[in-house]
Amino acid sequence: MTKKTEGNKRLASVVSSFMPYIEQKISGLSLPGLDRDDLRQEAFVALFSAIESYDSSKGALFSTYAITCINNRLADAVRKASSGKNRVLNESVPLSDEEDQVSVISEESPEETAIVREEYMQILEKMDTILSDFEREVLVMYSCGYKYAEIAERKNTTAKAVSNAIQRARKKLRQE
């Protein structure tokens, strides 16, 4: 078994172990313009960020750190959704016919869970291949809720360099 395959299996195990927590956490959140898929994606980004930025020398358990990152990211998503900035879009009615609309499934099937895991693995691989180490590290820290100034201090750089790295990373990820 290669190191990459072994690492992917460990990563899948970590993701699987946090899925019940993530599902339980997002089940209680409901805001216009913020559906479960969006919240799930935010939580997975936070979990990935926690995996990338975890430092065992800081004394915290990984699970504590990951849960904190997930909670902070979800709180930020809720704060942004409830800010009223996109109120008109959130309250609008779609123009399509009822028969064209997709019905919402209340519980995920094993197939959906496998798809989410595979998409997550693809995102990880994409980030590893197209982002520089600095861009990836800064994006991960930002995803965990760190402010530009905090990241700059930890990376011994300027807040402007952090902002530029995040913007470059976002642009690269959108283009792929």
Image: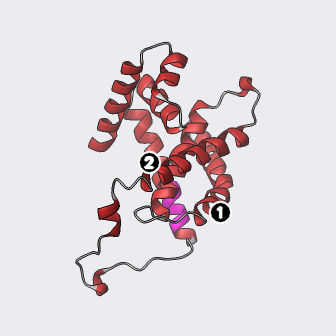
Whole-number angstrom distance, CA of label 2 to CA of label 1: 24 Å
Question: What residue do we see at 29% from left, 37% from top?
Answer: 171
Residue 1 seen in render = no
Residue 134 seen in render = yes
Q: In this view, does 87 lie above or below 14?
A: below
Name which residue type carries label 1. Gln
Q: Position of residue 144 (x, y in %)?
A: 55, 37
User: Which residue is at the far front?
Assistant: 84
Say few, some or many: other residues with alpha carbon within 10 Å of mark 2 (under 14 / 14 to 19 / 20 or more).
few
What secondary structure is found at the residue carrying circle 2? Answer: helix
Q: Is residue 144 above or below residue 158?
A: below
Q: Which of marks 2 and 1 is nearer the N terminus?
A: 1
Residues 66 and 83: in front is 83
Q: Is the magenta stretch mostly helix, strand or loop?
A: helix
- Which tag is nearer the camera, tag 2 or tag 1? 1
What secondary structure is found at the residue carrying circle 1? Answer: helix
Which residue is identified by label 1?
24
Question: What residue do we see at 72% from left, 41% from top?
Answer: 64
Which residue is identified by label 2?
122
Q: Where is residue 107 in the image (x, y as percent from the top left)?
A: 57, 74
The magenta segment is 112-117
Question: What residue do we see at 53% from left, 62% from top?
Answer: 114
Q: In this view, does 171 lie to the left or right of 70?
A: left
